[in-house]
Image (cartoon, helix red, strand yellow):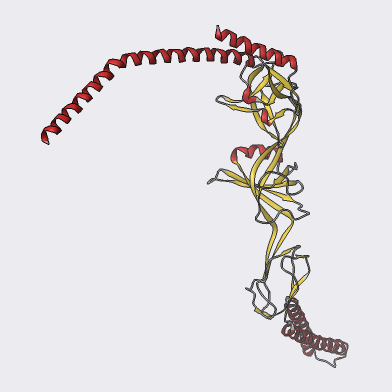
Amino acid sequence: MSRFWKIALIVIAVLVVGGVAFRLLHKPEEAGAGHHRRGGSAQSGQADQGQNQAGGNGQDNAPVPVTVEPTAKQSVPVYLTALGTVTALNNVTINPQVAGQMWTINFKEGQAVKKGDVIAQIDPRTFQAAYDQAAAKQKQDEASLATAISTLDRNQKLVANGYVAALDMDTFRNNVAQLRATVVADEASARSAKVQLDFTKIISPIDGVAGIRNVDPGNVVTTTTSIVTLTQIQPIYVIFNLPEQNLETVRDAFQNGANKLDVIALDRSDAHPLDTTGFLQVVDNQIDTSTGTFKLRAEFNNPKSTLWPGQFVNVQLRVRTVAGGLVIPAQAVQRGPDGDFVYKLQSDQTVAMQPVTVAGEVGDSHVMVTSGLAEGDQVVTEGQFRLKPGSKVQALKPGEVPPAPTASDADKKKGKQGGGRRGSNS
């Protein structure tokens, strides 16, 4: 059995050696064949590339349809923008001025109240009694004063005849003066008691909106108890900050209130104004050294209460108006490694890359440029991604659609493609 296995192993080894030798002898031929195949593919690829280049050149010669618009001159307002906070014109916390039991609450939370409205009532009975007592004391002393004055007048006539001593007359005069002072003190006490009585009626000091109340009828309140907070929102303030480098511009335009500077409050998305235009009211008297900004306050009439205390808004402050500013669509401006530029249409219907300087936004869709263009220059607003300097273009007006190719144009295109293929085959 062991001899059989030895013979089998020898046979297997011979077959393996023979197979390796066969592969080594035939490998150069296959490599040569592969080389010929690769060469054929390369030649075919070069022919296809030539054909594609021929077809591409034919397409590159066609003008690129783009939308162009002319530059225009107009009066352009210059705005400074900032983030502002809406603040109430007046914000009053209502506290009782006398202590007592709350009888009635005469307002609804969130309701508008007018100046002078009685918004709450404290139990007035104790204060009414104190006032009545002071008024009675005043009347009593006034009666005593009237008696003393009458006595003085009668004795004044008798003193000349010697019926009354001069010393007694001094007593009568002093009594009248003392009672007059007592009446004056009684009048003051009565007024004080009346004021305390009036304080039981809690009156709104401003026109405003009532907040959430803190007490209910029946509660005993003191002078430290907060009943409600009233907020005046018509008119209303918007406070915002600007960088200190804008201080000179704002002060020159504002001139300490001599000029009215328009202020616009926009929603957080800058989509639309929240209220009618307001006016700058005051520029703060110092710069915040921690932020490098200064504070400004604008006032808005807020007739529809669209501005609400604590609300964040985007603010635009108009500092001047540029007469004859050069305006182009914002979408025409492109950003390059060397700054902003536009594609300017040339007289030969090609485009050139023209650097521009953008001064600011004009509305939602235009910008003002201060250099690089002149009035009437045509700039590309749509289709810039297909352009490079010197590209031939087909200028279209906004909203205009390029005309569809005619049959002759299609035949010319096929002829060019056919000529490219024939050149490739030859």
Q: Nearer the viewer, residue 182 or 164?
A: 182
User: Is residue 364 visible in the rendered structure shown here?
Assistant: yes
Mark count: 0
Query: Residue at 75% across / 26% down in the picture?
Result: 401
Q: Residue 173 versus residue 300: which sits nearer the camera? A: 300
Left or right: residue 361 versus residue 7 is right
Looking at the rendering, in which quadrant would you find the C terminus? top right
Q: Quadrant of residue 121?
A: bottom right
Q: Tell me if residue 390 can be seen.
A: no
From this view, report whether residue 274 is shown above or below residue 29. Answer: below
On screen, residue 49 above or below 339: above
Q: Is residue 14 above or below residue 86?
A: above
In this rendering, the answer to whether 301 lies above or below 126 is above
> In the orientation shown, which residue stands out farthest toward the top?
426
Q: Position of residue 322 (x, y in %)?
A: 73, 31
How far across and how far down the image is residue 10, in percent? 16, 27
Report which quarter residue 305 is drawn in.
bottom right
Percent position of residue 176, x then y: 79, 85
| Residue 166 percent across, percent down from the top left | 79, 88
Looking at the picture, tell me which residue is in the foreground, 225 or 415: 415
Image quarter in which the N terminus is found:
top left
**Quarter assignment of residue 272:** top right
Q: Residue at x 63, y 73 (%)?
A: 225
